[in-house]
Image (cartoon, rainbow, N blue to C red):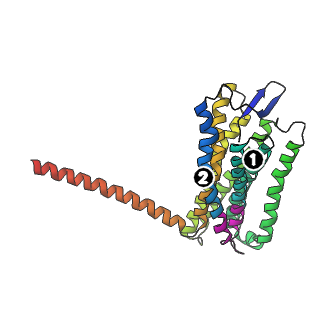
Amino acid sequence: MEHFHRNNSSHNKTYSYIDYSNSYYNEETYYMYFYVAPGIIIAISLPLTLVGIYALFSMVRKDHIAPIYVINLLISDLIQLCCMIVQMIVQPESLLIIYIFGLMASVFFMVCISLERYLVIAWPLWYRLRRTIKISVVVCVVVWTFPLVCVLLFYFSDDFSRVSPTALGVFFLLPFPLLIFSLVGTIKALSAAISVRAEEKRRIVGLLVLVLLIYMVLFLPGIIWFLIENEETVLILGCVTFISFRLSPLADLFMYIFLRKGAVNKVLSCLCCFRKDRTSQTSSSEIDGNTHTVTSV
């Protein structure tokens, strides 16, 4: 998302484009933020996102609808990636509203993923009767419609390029309590769930923790930037927001790991093997060093 100029006063707080070549940016910083970093993110995220969508379609079953929300999340990421590609070539002002639409949809599909996992564990009998692909599709349509209505209201306002940062900050902050509630409620429910296997518990908790971390690390800086009034820190937070928002499509791809059965165990086993190798190498080095000392003596 392009950097924006914030014109703060007691009566007006606006949100509009700035000239990228202004005095705040030298030439190296300009190309790093607007070409190099987005180019690397696009080169990695775009093919992996397409592969992830294709792989998740094969996982959708009548009793396993969580991939539907992740698929829609990745589609919202595709919208953001396409906007980033166009932004690197031209910088149309109207593209901003499409990018914001992709961000809004991405955040609320993260909420859908968290709440769906919570309902599976906390209210299994109630949710089992309502866990159908048809209902999931309806939920997805509602989630797509809500940010679409918001951005259309922005677009058909007097000047859609002058959107209130405070309104955007409040909008992006709404999912935060829902994500916290889903994680805490799921952990409490899992502690009493005897029938749920240990691997399944790790996958569910890991997915919810990942969603919350993505939101806190990549979206909270932008929310603070939207809401902040101190002009001295606006530029630094703006740069952090610019990069963090663009990293969200790449971070969302890690959710695929927690939807594949056995994938979490494979990752943990790889990490354990890596730690064992490092430990054995350290022990071997210490033994070799002690042997060399004894030999010298």
Percent across and percent down for residue 193 are 61, 68
Q: Residue furthest front?
A: 89
Rendered position, 227 above or below 155: above
Rendered position, 140 above or below 93: below
Percent across and percent down for residue 190 are 61, 64
> Which residue is at 76% across, 46% downward?
100
> Which residue is at 71% across, 39% downward?
2
Seen from the viewer's position, the closer of residues 279 and 3 is 3
SS at mark 2? helix
CA separation in Å, label 2 and label 1: 18 Å
SS at mark 1? helix
Is residue 36 found left or right of 177 in the rendered image?
left
> Which residue is at 63% across, 64% downward?
51
Percent across and percent down for residue 253 are 61, 58
Instruction: Kindly indicate the quadrant of the structure image that contains residue 230.
Output: top right
Does the CB distance between marks 2 and 1 fall below 8 Å? Answer: no
Q: Which residues are magenta?
A: 52-71
Task: Residue under label 2, please give it.
Answer: 43
Magenta region, main secondary structure: helix
> Can I make out residue 187 in this image?
no
Rendered position, 173 above or below 210: above
Numbered tag placed on residue 7 in the rendering: none
Task: Residue under label 1, please give it.
Answer: 99
The 10 Å Cα crowd at callout 2, few under 14, some 14 to 19, many 20 or more, is few
Q: Nearer the viewer, mark 2 or mark 1?
A: 2
69 in the magenta segment = yes
Q: Residue furthest left?
A: 297
